[in-house]
Amino acid sequence: MASRSGEDLSCSVCQDIFKDPVVLSCSHSFCRDCLKRWWAEKLTQDCPVCKRRSSRSDPPASLVIKNLCESFILERDQRGPEKVCSLHSEKLKLFCLDHLQPVCVVCRDSKTHNNHRFQPINEAAENLKEEIQKYLKPFKEKLKLFVKVKGNCDQTAAHMKVQARHTEVKIKDQFKKLHRFLEEEEEARLSALREEEKQKSQMMEEKMEPLSREIAALSDTVRATEEQLRAEDISFLNHYKAAVERVRQPPLLEDHQLLSGALIDQAKHLGNLTYNIWDKMKEMVSYCPVVLDPNTAHPELVLSEDLTSVSRGERQKLPDNPERFNSFIAVLGSEGFNSGIYSWDVEVGDNACWFVGVAEESVERKGSVWSGMWRIGFSMGSYKALYPSAQPINLSLREKLQRIRVHLDWEKGLFFFDADTKKPIFTFSHKFTQKLFPYISSSNKLPIKILPQLVSDDCWDSVPRPEGK
């Protein structure tokens, strides 16, 4: 009943929806206030509809009608006021397909809509809603994509903070090692200086002790002789013999000269000090020609703290940034090459599935397109060479590869050698046109390592060295 026009829920006195409805013995219902005013005006307690006299001056409330009225009012408020034609005050029951607007039946027959096409409101609404849904679909898909991108951006921002904190800790650790080395080196050099000072001070004390005795003896001789020289002639002559014997003996038994090398060797301690410290740091410093880029690593690859080793592990929750592989279980080096000659050694050890080589900067990272990569590897028990637009080449090797040297010559191609035996493995003769990055792929938990190079004399040939250093 509440879904109808509301006529069944209207008071016959005020012609409005019941307010505090009451029911008479004749079953007719009215608003309590409307009924009181009616009886006050008529001076009798007759039913306003059937004129039957009511036996009660205070009729009971009708809870059923009250609940129905409240439901009807709530539904009407949610539905909004019923729309009527602004020109004819008739209900809008039709939709003009030419003017694209709701109309009433009077509008349909007017000159304004002559020869126009019409549909019932409900049919037109259903059809046009389907049309809007069709147009809305790409918006919803775009919204879904944007939400996904925003989620990835949020994840990237959070991961970036984790990266920054982790990198900060590693930088501090490295500088702590350098500070410790410099502090120990400083203490060692200060100790050497103090030891030299102690030795040379002791030597000077040993040198000065007999010299002091000689000075005291000579002082006594000079003083006694000068006293004789100031005495009277008779006294002088009486002691002349002793005085002349005293001054005729040699004054010094040895030549007390300052020894060579008595001073602190400042040149030894200060000369080329920073260079000598730098030179000694080679013992604790190594150089890795290739550093892996964690931002390119497939989520199932785990990189070492120094970014020179990689192995396969559990899938990590990482941002799907454009640089990252999500199909190939691979990682790239952090620096690319677009000219020149470069070499690096890769230790594959007993890894059961691996590939090493180079990849172009434009290599497909989000799919399985085998282009832009030149590699050799070991898979399913055999060695292979793979390169763009060609079938894999099986490699016949007598010895198991443990360490591989990758040699890139931008003008001539890519060369692979057994780093232990120096024997060639395979050569891609090719003149490259794009920037190339070192490439490693691993499907095994055993690590694959970029081998470091010690900072040897070969790395320092351009630095002039003093003799004996």
Image (cartoon, helix red, strand yellow):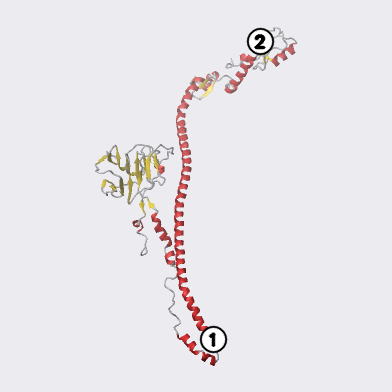
Q: Amino acid at mark 2?
A: His
In terms of depth relative to the viewer, which is nearer, 427 or 81? 427
Name of the residue lying farthest toward the right? 43
The percent coordinates of residue 296 (x first, y second) are 39, 42
Which SS class for mark 1? Answer: helix
Q: Residue at x 46, y 26 (%)?
A: 131
The quadrant where residue 302 appears: top left
User: Considering only vertical position in the picture, is 116 above or below 398?
Assistant: above
Disc on res. 61: none
User: Considering only vertical position in the picture, is 275 above or below 228?
Assistant: above
Q: Residue at x 52, y 83 (%)?
A: 223
Q: If the image is split into quadrants, where does the C terminus sit?
A: bottom left
Q: If the image is split into quadrants, where does the N terminus sit?
A: top right
In terms of depth relative to the viewer, which is nearer, 358 or 66? 358
User: Considering only vertical position in the picture, is 145 above or below 218?
Assistant: above
- Residue corresponding to mark 2: 28
* First of labels 1, 2 by sequence position: 2
The percent coordinates of residue 250 (x first, y second) are 44, 83
Judged left or right of residue 32, residue 468 is: left
How many other residues sit within 10 Å of disc 1, few (<14), some (14-19) or many (≥20)? few
- Residue corresponding to mark 1: 227
Q: CA distance from mark 1 to mark 2?
A: 162 Å
The percent coordinates of residue 260 (x first, y second) are 42, 72
The percent coordinates of residue 134 (x first, y second) are 45, 27
In terms of depth relative to the viewer, which is nearer, 370 or 109? 370
Which SS class for mark 2? Answer: loop
The quadrant where residue 347 appears: top left
Q: Residue at x 33, y 57 (%)?
A: 458
User: Considering only vertical position in the picture, is 97 above or below 408?
Assistant: above
Q: Amino acid at mark 1?
A: Glu
